[in-house]
Amino acid sequence: MKKDELLINNNRKKYLIVFICMFMQAIPFAIAQNIQPLFIPYVINKFDFSLASFSLIFTFGALASATFSPFLGKLFGKINIKILFIVGTVLSSLGFLGFGFAQTLPQFYILSGVCQVGCVLLSSLGVPYVINNWFPKKCRGIALGVAFSGGSIGNVFLQEITSQMLASKGSSYSYIVFGIISLLCSLPIILLFMRMPKANEVEVVEENSNESNMEDNRFKGLGVKETTKNKYFWRCSIGYAIIAIAISALSTQYATYFTGELGMSATLVGTLGSVFALFGLIGNITGGVLFDKIGTLKTMSMSFVLSIVAVIGLLISSKVHSLAFLFSIAYGLNVYSYMSAPAFMTTDVFGKKDSSVILGIINLIFALGYALGSTLFGVIVDNFGFNMGWIVMIGCLLLGYILLLTSIKRVKDQNKKFI
């Protein structure tokens, strides 16, 4: 086979893998991760749970994923990728299905942990590992952005379907149905198409390309040992964890606010979720492009503005319900701030050396903030109301982004002496 034909054939295989990763984000990941907030008002009404106590499912889920991530990361490269994705899908799907049979808070907490550990395998660890192997040099960023956009694509449809099913069938029935759908749709795709590249299928890097020249001029990094001695690394990580508190509240409590507090119809709430998902699709892809074009500092500064606008949209929607679309649009565009941002920030700010280990530390600290966010918000709402909860989240965003952005600027200035 001629070289051109080999390249075309290999490109087809790579793009198929990107599509498969998109599909895994769109079905099992989106079901396990994105539609749970819609269930909150129905579950707490059915079992008479408090908002704060039930919101702990997000805390336990985040803590479980953070705890198991380092161990699970060591499995990649040692165990067949099909097996890892199958285990991830089974855990996330059966965990979600199990919610339909849960009767007590501890049962919900345990199942949330199982579900999120599955998501770690098939999404946050699995998708980057597969994409990085199929795209070792060129187009890795855009491939990751497109792959992760699958979650937003699935969410466009799932938000409306879930809202209608919850309104007509209730939470237990909906949990079981979506758990079965997740399992039955994913397993055949994994078994038939998911695989790692062979030696002759790895991307051929063109010599003297613009990308290669640009890569040579990038800061290589000092490694994890020196990076963790830098006080600005910890300020950056702590700032990102404080931002995660607000991200957690915004991601998990909007449906309860719209349904339980503002009394919006299931149709409107589903539409708001679908609009968020649609703009999340745009945000996922354009976020990666922005990181490449204008860098981490400017891109995350834009994220700060979008986050504040999103919370303002929630506050003013209590007066005019249609203004809730401001939240859906702004927060959707800002989805890159917690999907692709950690990986881009790690290499851009702290360099490529030991980047996976440094990313693991950042993700762990972020997960702790995310685990705290939903519960903290629930406690504030139970005692002071939703408006106070959103105001506190604005405070978290202000403090978190000040720490994050100033630390990035400081580290960037330090890096100049090493280039």
Image (cartoon, rainbow, N blue to C red):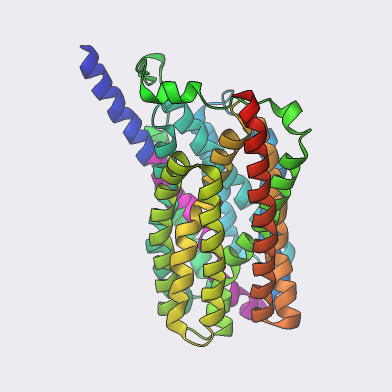
At 65% from the left and 65% from the top, the residue drawn is 102
Instruction: Name which quarter of the figure residue 79 lies in.
Output: top right
Residue 186 at what x, y percent from top left?
43, 45
Q: Is residue 60 visible?
A: no
At 42% from the left and 61% from the top, the residue drawn is 277
**Closer to the camera in the image, 375 or 40:** 375
Judged by its main secondary structure, the magenta piece is helix
**Closer to the camera in the image, 399 or 84:** 399
Residue 410 at what x, y percent from top left?
68, 41
Instruction: Name which quarter of the figure residue 314 lies in.
Output: bottom right
Image mark count? 0
Residue 304 at what x, y percent from top left?
57, 59
Residue 34 highlighted magenta (yes or no): yes
Per the rendered image, the range of residues in magenta is 20-47
At 45% from the left and 79% from the top, the residue drawn is 323
Residue 357 at what x, y percent from top left?
67, 31
Q: Is residue 2 left or right of residue 181?
A: left
Q: Is residue 398 visible?
A: yes
Q: Is residue 238 left or right of residue 170?
A: right
